[in-house]
Image (cartoon, helix red, strand yellow):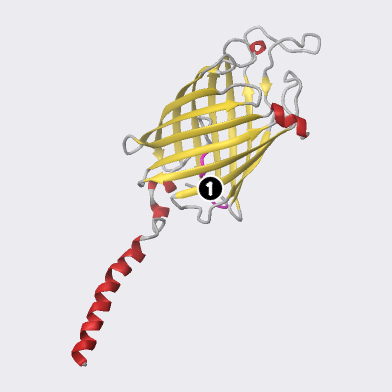
Amino acid sequence: MRKTTTLLTAAVLSLARPVRTLAQTVDPNVGNTETPFIQNIRPDRPGQTVTTNMLHPGQVQLETGVLRFDPMDASWGARRTLSNALLRVGFFNHIELRASQGYLHALPGSSFSEANPTVSPAGFTPLTVGAKFLASTNQDARSQVVLLTEMTLRTGDASFINKSYEPAIRLLVSQQLGARYGLEANVGFRQRGFQAADTKLGQYLGTLALNGPLGRNFGFFAEAYTTWQRTTRFLPGLTSGLYWRPLPGLRLDTTAGQQFGDLGTGFTLGGGLSVRLPH
């Protein structure tokens, strides 16, 4: 009897060992907080893709940049320069507050006035405010789902005519690959006004982006995206670039892109600086 009991105990212990090992490795999020993908700054610029990264309470992040582009509206001119800034603030209960505004530089020799309203718009663009809400359970998990809501206000320079409130919503999804790479995707919708008829003229957006390191402090990002409306065809585009991150909370980037189609933005070229405090 004693021999049988000893054999049974040994069998149970031998079976428990792999089960215990499996239990220790079944959750890939254990220890993920310390990975470079989580610790390093992840700006929402410079492409169309907004990251699932959310600031912790008390953190503040400023993202600035300059972009050269071909406006979709021919009345704006052939080539324009847009400076932009995004302020992000970490709030409680897995919420991040944000506000963004751009400055469209004037074309040489142009000056808008009420007596000459046909001149291309220039100056501060309408202000956009919004918030991110964490939909997944762990802010530092390898897989993330975040909801982004935004509202563009009727502010900005008087040269931007026909201004309207523009509500927008996006679903942000990401998957961490290894310790430093990430795959991000967005699906969103924006419309002018609040009436049901305005949805027919709203714009849809879909993006897919990959980012990761090329060295200790250098890295890359690349994305494919498309916009479309119910009555228009797809307008696909590509964005790629490089970044340098001398500190975990500081990043400089340069980017180039191309949107195709008669209504696309054409070739774009830009650069920017992003800072997170505290690091």
At mark 1, the secondary structure is strand
Say which quadrant the N terminus sits in: bottom left
Residue 279: percent from left, percent from top: 47, 46
Q: Is residue 197 left or right of residue 66?
A: right
Residue 267 image offset from top left, x and y in percent: 50, 16
- Using the rendered view, name the quadrant where residue 206 is placed: top right
The stretch of residues the image draws in magenta is: 51-57
For the image, the number of numbered tags is 1
| Position in image of residue 168 (x %, y %) | 66, 36
**Where residue 247 sits in the image (x, y, percent)?**
41, 41
The 10 Å Cα crowd at callout 1, few under 14, some 14 to 19, many 20 or more, is many
Residue 52 colored in magenta in the image: yes
Furthest-top residue in view?
109
Foreground residue among 158 and 221: 221
Left or right, 108 with respect to 66, comes to right
**Image point (74%, 32%), residue name:** 165
Question: Residue 8 versus residue 167: which sits nearer the camera?
Answer: 8
Residue found at the far right of this picture: 115
Task: Determine if the magenta segment contains residue 262.
Answer: no
Q: Residue at x 59, y 35 (%)?
A: 86
Residue drawn 53% across and 47% down? 145
Q: As shown in the figure, which amino acid type bears the numbered disc 1?
A: Val
The residue tagged 1 is: 145
